[in-house]
Every structure is written in structure tokens, then in C-alpha cells.
Amino acid sequence: MEETHTMPDPVTSAAPTTPAAPSVPAAPAVPPTPPVPLAALLAREDLALRQIAGPAAPGVVIHWAHTSEMADPYPYLLGGELLLTAGVHVPRDADPERLGDYFGGYVSRIVAAGGAALGFGLAPVHDTVPAALVAACEAASLPLLEVPPRTTFSGVARAVWQLMAQARLAELRRVTEAQQSLAAAASRPDPVPAVLRQLAQRLGGRAVLYGPDGGEIAAAGREPAGQARDALRRLAGVVCPAGGAGAAPAPASATDTVGDTHLLAYALGSGQGFVLGVATSQREPGDHTVASVGSVLLSLLTGEHQSGAGAARSSALVRLLLGAAPEAVAPLLESGGGRWVVVHARPETQLPDAVAASALGAALGSPLVDLAGDVVRVLVPAGREPAPQPGWALGVSAAVEPREWPAADLQAARALARARATRGPLVRHGARPGLADLVSRPDAQAHARALLAPLAGRPELAETLRSWLSLHGSWDRTAVALGVHRNTVRQRIARCAALLGADLDDADLRMELWFALRHGA
């Protein structure tokens, strides 16, 4: 038996009123997935969708599908949705004028919330799409789709996600092929021009290498209009400003838009003055990754060897291996102000490789990168504030002196675990003074050893207890942070309670245990 539209329980609702000044989101909160062109969804013959109102512009995209029978869907929309409804909320036996006012308010609320399109299902409530709704969508330039009775809303939602998966796969394939072609270009006898040519070809725009004096050293691809060309040069000055020592820290990358041209600038190497500039007519999700790979390769081919920074880092490594203290070799690494932060990073979807690690280091403004299994560690001068990076989860330590690098490494690891557990793009280690400042370090350690003595020799129990307390007793988030099953977390916490002889539901005891685990270890 063929499924029809899923119908919620009917609710009595009044016609929505058009707000005097709706709060329009500055930008829709869209998920990290490629959008789906509305034209691609309409082209699916199995859905038999038909657009009956609104613009047929090829640029209309949707980010997800959402079903609602609310008379006012505004509070439940994030922006970018294809909103699906069977019209349960439409007032029955309303005269045409009242029905026109109702649909006018209904459509205006969808538009105010950032909805991308509206799908109206036929049967069992309505045999045709109400003419007043068609008129309202046409007036508001909101695409309106007619969903036939044989097409279920769940089928439409599944089709949207299928198209998103296909788009993501195509984008990953494009990025992989671009990485391979850029790496091959870097091995040619003329590597810098070859990399720029490949970069321009893969991004469909212009790639320029600027020297320390701001002049154009090499370029490839079609040159943009004069205004965009001048703006790209100015953008290069943003990531590599004049002023030398003592100048304010500059960002590792910058973006701008002039008309229909998108501009990108990347500082190459460790601040020696070389800049990669990119100008494109469109911006695809993987373009930043491709450009980052190009910037890493150009960093290796230009300022890195010419400036002597690589030799300085090699000298620092040799001195460390021969027994020098970190604070003695840190000046060779060119830290601004002598303080550093440690960043731990992990990709959201796959294991990192050397190219991805180098690209991350370039984006964070530091060549001091360590690829350690599934985690990338980056040592960043404190003056270059790490920012969230698309596709990565980051944990950032407090700013420390070189002698405190090992402690900062642990801070970054814990911050990364929390970022992954909370699905946040970046978590910083809290450096705000607190109770720990009231107790001396030796006293805190002695108290911690006594309190946690029953857990001695069981590091997995202590670490599970630490994560569980930090995540407010959430079994699921703790399991994600530790990479174990939630039942394993439950068993370990029960074992901790038994060994400690304590009631872990006691808030005072939780605070004391957290203090011991956090500051006394």
C-alpha cells in the first residue's frame, strides 16, 4: 500500500500576523554540508516535484528539508530550509480575502526566517495548492513546489541528503585531485610558476606570488579587473604589513570581495614577506583547502629556505637533542614576546596526513607542526591567536613560557577532548584565576594524592572520572571524548565510586574530586 503524506494531529491555530520588524538572521546557521541546488531536486523524476511559483533562478539552494504544520514556522527555522507542509494549519471555510491575508503573513514569516523554498503536499487535506498561497509566494519571490500525493515528505528529505552526499563526495574528489596535481607541479624544474598555474586552473581564477617588497614575482590565470587587482594587492599588505619588528601581529590569511570577485591572501612561511594572493569568480567549499595546500608548497619553495628560518629551527632541534633547555632555544624559533600556545587538532571526518597538517600549520601561522597519529600538534607564538579552522576540532592551551611547553601540551590535549565531546570547533584552556590560586601547588598535589589514592595504578579510571566530571556527568559526551562505549563509562564511574567509597551524586564531593584531578595531578 503506497504511503501518503505523514499527518500530525490537527491543531487549532490562528492566521499568523505579519511582524512589524522581523528579526532577520544575518546569515543562516547552515550545517557543514554542501547545499543542494533547487534545480537538482526538481530534476529528480522519482519525486515528480513541480515549481508553481517564485523565481526559477539557478542560484537557489537549500541546506536541508524540514516538515512543519505550525501556522507560524518562524521560531523553528534556522535558514536555508525547504519547508514542507500539507496545509493542516490552513483555516477551513475562510473567505478569499481572509485566506489571502493568512497566506501573506505565513509566507512573510518563512522569508523572514531565511527559508529557501516551500513545498506543499497534495492530499489528504488539499486536492490542489491554494491559489492564495501561489499568489503570496509569487509576491514574496519564494519558490513554491507542488508535492504530488505519491511523494512522501520523508522521500523528499532523503533525496536532499542523497544529493548532499553526492556533492560532498564530488568536492572531496576535486580537492584530492587538486592536491595531487599541486604536489606534482612542485616537483617540476620551475616549481613556483607550475604551482601557480595549477592553483589558478583548479580554482578557476588568478594566483599571484608577491615578494617582501609587495611586488608581483609571478602569476598565472586570467587577471581580474583593475579594482579587484588593486584590492588583492592591498589584501596582501594586510597579512604582511610594513613596519618590521614591533609592528602589530598580522593575520595568517585574509579574505575580501570586490563585486563578483572573491579574494584570498595567505602569508607564506614564518613571516618573511612572501604572500600568495588568489582571485576567483566563485567560492566553492573546498577552495580554501586547495589554496591552503598551494600556500604550504609555496612556503617551502620561497621564503623558507631563503630566509634561513629552516636552518634556525634545525639548530634549535640539535640544541634540544644535546641537552639545551627549551627557553634557551626558543629565541631561534622567532616567537613574539617569548610566550607560546600549543594547539591540538583533529579533522572531523578523516585521519590527517602530512599535507593536511602542513596546511593547518600555515593557516595558524606556524611551521612548527607535528603529525602524531590522529592528532596534529602545532606550536604557535602567542601573538598569533589561533582561530577555528573549517573541518577541524581544535584545543588550545594557555599562553606559556618555553619551560612550560609540556604542561601546555597536556592542556591542549584536554581542550581538544572537550571540543570533540561538545562538537565545538575550538576550545581554549581556561586561564582565569580561581580556587587553585588559593592553595599552593605542593599542598594541592599532596591533597590530590591522598584523595585519589584508591585510583592509583588505574589511569583509565582517573581519566574517565576527569572527563565525566568536566562534562557534567554526561555519559554520551564522555564516551565520545574518550572513544569508548557509554556502558564502559558507566562501569568505570561505578568502579570509581566503589574504590573511593563515595557518593558521586554529592555536589561537594564532585567539586573536591574535580579540584584534585584538575590542579593536583
Image (tube, rainbow, N blue to C red):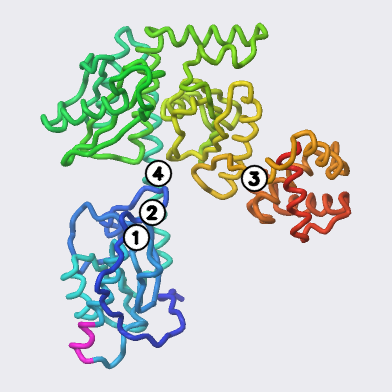
Reading the chain from its start, which is encountered first: label 4 or label 3? Answer: 4
Residue at 37% from the left image edge and 7% from the top image edge: 306
Please tell me whether residue 354 is drawn above or below residue 5 in the rendered image. Answer: above
| Residue with the mark numbered 3 | 434
Please tell me whether residue 65 is drawn above or below residue 515 in the rendered image. Answer: below
Residue at 33% from the left image edge and 10% from the top image edge: 188
Reading the chain from its start, which is encountered first: label 1 or label 3? Answer: 1
| Residue with the mark numbered 1 | 79
Q: CA distance from mark 4 to mark 3?
A: 45 Å
Q: Quadrant of the C terminus?
A: top right
Q: CA distance from mark 1 to mark 4?
A: 20 Å
Nearest the viewer among 398 and 228 is 398
Nearest the viewer among 457 and 37 is 457
Nearest the viewer among 482 and 363 is 363
Secondary element under disc 3, as helix, strand or loop, is loop
**Crowding near pointer 2: few (<14 within 10 Å), some, many (20+)?**
some
| Residue with the mark numbered 4 | 168
Look at the image and give the residue range highlighted in magenta: 95-101
Give the dominant element type of the magenta stretch: helix, strand or loop: helix
* Residue 426 pos. (x, y %): 50, 42
Please tell me whether residue 333 is drawn above or below residue 311 in the rendered image. Answer: below
Q: Is residue 348 magenta?
A: no
- Looking at the rendered structure, the kind of residue marked 4 is Arg
Of badges 2 and 4, nearer the viewer stands 2
